[in-house]
Image (cartoon, rainbow, N blue to C red):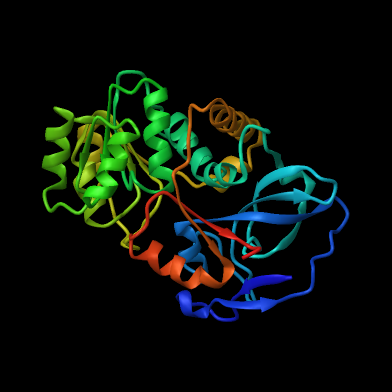
């Protein structure tokens, strides 16, 4: 089978298109022929070995896929690695059946980002009707879905952060009440102006100066959920600041949700159900062949992309 493999950690240049033996399922596993692989910003951290979970070489990257099992079921799954390939063997227990109304591209677009958006807003962010939410990277895979989920939850105002006219138009079209340039040097002031005052929930994905600016937009009992650290710049928070503002700063990692089947099943069913009804739609920014994966990683790392990017292993 064709696959992308790395034998050393680094940037896009370490990924090589290779031929590997077809995987052989163990007891309790299924062989899946992959039709679409989701590419995530976290993949760029994994190939650099800067992800939350440590990686081992040689490595076939890719943590999200859609495909067909050896007994003909259309399924999606999140895995530790191995999805940048034509085939994969995975435990039966991780497979999610895809509704007939949801095509492969939508399924691949919502499996990680949709469940993340739902989990962040409902579990960690505890967004309540009428509250104001700020969505970082709102034109990206997770952000574009978070804007829609927040609106469906009855948010009073949804403020999206995005750079460039094309991305900002997209965010407004998804239902955001306002959009603020994510690269503004006056991010705090512009968010407060757009929201008409302090905000209740912030989905923070950048880290560094963005984290500091957005923390300053929260009102009493406001919650900031750290969903990513795109800049790779870590932040520290003084406990006195949290005390004086009655603020909450928390993190969200999807793997912890998936490790709780009681919580994960509810979120997965809700996201796939909303997509099947047409109430939730992944923004697919492009579908590429395995041979184009280096370009895809460069574009994602350079924030040149919109929505969800996918790989088609048959190309």
Nearest to the observer: residue 250 or residue 239: 250
Q: Quadrant of residue 96?
A: top right
Quarter of the figure with the N terminus:
bottom right
Question: Does any portion of residue 165 appear in the rendered image?
Answer: yes
Residue at image x 40%, y 36%? 146
Query: Observer-nearest residue: 62 or 125?
Result: 62
Give the residue at the far front of this rendering: 315
Within the image, what quadrant is residue 60 found in?
bottom right
Q: Residue at x 43, y 30 (%)?
A: 149
Query: Which residue corresponds to the image point at 69% horizontal and 71% vertical from the top-left?
Result: 2
Relative to residue 264, is residue 161 depicted above or below?
Answer: below
Find residue 302 and report its horizontal and vertical position in percent: 33, 65
Q: Position of residue 30 (x, y in %)?
A: 81, 52
Residue 187 pos. (x, y %): 16, 46
Which quarter of the figure has residue 35?
A: bottom right
Point out residue 200 in the picture as x, y percentages from the top left corner.
Answer: 28, 29
Relative depth, front residue between 120 and 15: 15
Q: Residue furthest right?
A: 27
Q: Is residue 206 left or right of residue 274?
A: left
Examine the rendered structure and indicate whether residue 108 appears above or below residue 126: below
> Which quarter of the image is occupied by the C terminus?
bottom right
> Residue at 53% across / 42% down in the picture?
110
User: Does residue 28 appear left or right of residue 209 in this picture?
Assistant: right
Q: Report whether residue 48 is seen.
A: no
């Amino acid at each position: 089978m064709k696959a992308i493999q790395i034998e050393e950690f680094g940037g896009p240049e370490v990924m090589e298109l290779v031929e590997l033996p077809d995987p052989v399922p163990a007891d309790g596993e299924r062989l899946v022929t992959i039709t679409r692989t989701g590419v995530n910003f976290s993949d760029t951290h994994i190939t650099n070995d800067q992800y939350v979970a440590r990686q081992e070489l040689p490595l076939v990257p890719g943590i999200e896929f859609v495909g067909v099992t050896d007994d003909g079921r259309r399924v999606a799954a999140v895995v530790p690695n191995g999805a940048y390939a034509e085939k994969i063997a995975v435990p039966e227990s991780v497979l999610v059946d895809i509704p007939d109304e949801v095509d492969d591209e939508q399924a691949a677009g919502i499996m990680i980002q949709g469940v993340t958006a739902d989990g962040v807003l409902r579990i960690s962010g505890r967004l309540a009707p009428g509250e104001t939410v700020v969505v970082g990277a709102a034109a990206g895979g997770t952000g574009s879905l978070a804007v829609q989920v927040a609106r469906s939850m009855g948010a009073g105002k949804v403020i999206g952060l995005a750079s460039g006219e094309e991305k900002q138009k997209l965010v407004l079209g998804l239902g955001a009440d306002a959009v603020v340039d994510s690269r503004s040097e006056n991010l705090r002031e512009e968010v407060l102006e757009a929201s008409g005052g302090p905000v209740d929930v912030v989905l923070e994905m950048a880290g560094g100066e963005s984290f500091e600016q957005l923390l300053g937009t929260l009102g009493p009992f406001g919650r900031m959920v750290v969903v990513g650290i795109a800049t790779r710049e870590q932040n520290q928070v003084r406990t006195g600041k949290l005390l004086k503002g009655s603020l909450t700063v928390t993190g969200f990692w999807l793997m912890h949700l998936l490790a709780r089947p009681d919580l994960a099943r509810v979120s997965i069913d809700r996201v796939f159900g909303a997509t099947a009804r047409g109430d939730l739609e992944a923004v697919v920014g492009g579908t590429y062949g395995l041979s184009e994966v280096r370009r895809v990683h460069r574009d994602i790392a350079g924030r040149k992309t919109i929505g969800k990017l996918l790989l088609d292993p048959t190309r």
